[in-house]
Image (tube, grey):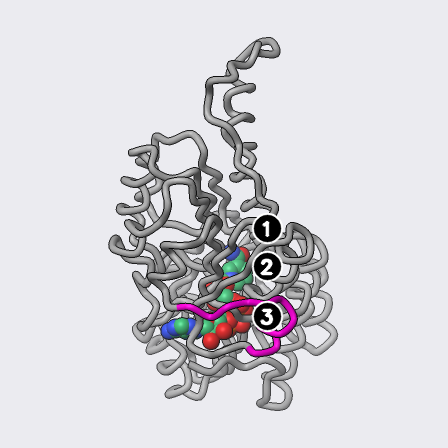
Amino acid sequence: MKAFLTRETYDTPLLAEKLSVAGIDLEVRTDSSVCPREVLEQQVSRVDALLTHTEDEIDADLLSRAAPQLRVVANMGIGFSNIDVAAARARGVIVTNTPTEEAFEATAEATVAILLSVARRIPALHVERRALTCDPDPSFLRATATSVRGKTLGIVGMGRIGSRVARIMHGGFGNRIQYFDLVAKPELEEALGARRVDLPTLMRSSDLIAVNMPLSQQTRNLISAEMIDLMQDHATFVNTARGELVDEPALVARLNAGKLHGAGLDVYGPAVDDIQFDNIALTSHFANFEDQAYTAMTTLVADNVVSALTTGQALTPVKE
Ligand SMILES: NC(=O)c1ccc[n+]([C@@H]2O[C@H](COP(=O)([O-])OP(=O)(O)OC[C@H]3O[C@@H](n4cnc5c(N)ncnc54)[C@H](O)[C@@H]3O)[C@@H](O)[C@H]2O)c1
């Protein structure tokens, strides 16, 4: 049986070893860039298992080129908005993701890390210091950091990651928690005193905002220009979910006007290249790219592929 991994990861030897034990040959694309479309087209027509990253577009057209033996598309990540799950199902192809505890913890930890660093202006101070040859004599008239303790944190999407962010920020910094979600979370309301509110209320009344909502047809552009307009000028905004949830040109315009404390974005589109404002942290979809989470996710990808190819059932198949 043959499998193809679209981009090498630091845990590829572990993956190859686990597949090899089950009689599956893994071909690895060693280039570190996003896999070109033509390579995906070529590989999908010859393998039993396609091992993808969240940047790989696995749409209906690509799946129509799949070999009859393609049984599983195993995505390395919790999100799977890059895959047309309905088109895969129509061809009898199982789609899997990697919802491990470690990945939830890692993404929540990264969300908190970005939130704290932007609130305290660490990215801006870092850039400022790196541009100098010696320690500056700092002006006390320049922009100040903002405290995190005792603030109101608004969480957009109180799921596995959002609820962990809420617990950390409530327990560690005494944040008042409010959230926007389709589903009420009575256990968090009880444990943290969290309050479920509508989205405009959350955007208008939060000091800190964390977006932890999956991307879907319903949530695309959820944080619209109108919602962005509602934020307070001192608010700190963090998105570690998906860039397409946010009207990014509107967010960029607000930042460039100096009308937000700052923003931290782990996921985004090209609009961020126009940001002039200094208090901005841009990371490259790294939130669960850490040792424990990545090893756990790699192990689950391997177990999913082995299980799908040998029993026809995966451990963590996704639903649309
Ligand atoms: N940056 C990264 O590296 C990284 C890592 C992991 C996950 N993510 C992203 O984070 C997202 C959230 O992950 P999770 O595991 O917490 O998801 P989850 O499914 O556990 O939680 C999502 C929450 O959003 C709510 N929700 C969904 N659709 C809604 C809608 N239309 N309106 C209101 N509420 C809605 C759900 O009720 C749920 O409570 C993932 O989908 C993924 O895109 C990013």
Q: CA distance from mark 3 to mark 1?
A: 21 Å
Residue 68: image x %, image y %? 43, 84
What secondary structure is marked by label 3?
loop
Give the label, 3 or 2, closer to the camera: 2
Residue drawn at 64 percent across, 53 percent down: 174
Q: Are marks 2 and 1 in contact (CB under 8 Å)?
A: yes
Q: Which residue is mark 3?
A: 98
Q: Which residue is mark 1?
A: 112
- Please say if 209 is above or below 99: above
Residue 39: image x %, image y %? 41, 60
- Please say if 226 is above or below 270: below
Q: Which residue is mark 2?
A: 165
What secondary structure is marked by label 1?
helix
* Amino acid residing under circle 1: Val
Residue drawn at 37 percent across, 46 percent down: 232
Residue 196: image x %, image y %? 47, 70
Instruction: Look at the image and give the residue range highlighted in magenta.
Output: 186-197
Q: CA distance from mark 2 to mark 1?
A: 6 Å
Quarter of the N terminus within the rendering:
bottom right
Residue drawn at 46 percent across, 26 percent down: 143
Residue 6: image x %, image y %? 50, 60
Q: CA distance from mark 3 to mark 2?
A: 19 Å
**In the rendered structure, which disc, 3 or 1, sits on the residue that comes first in sequence?**
3
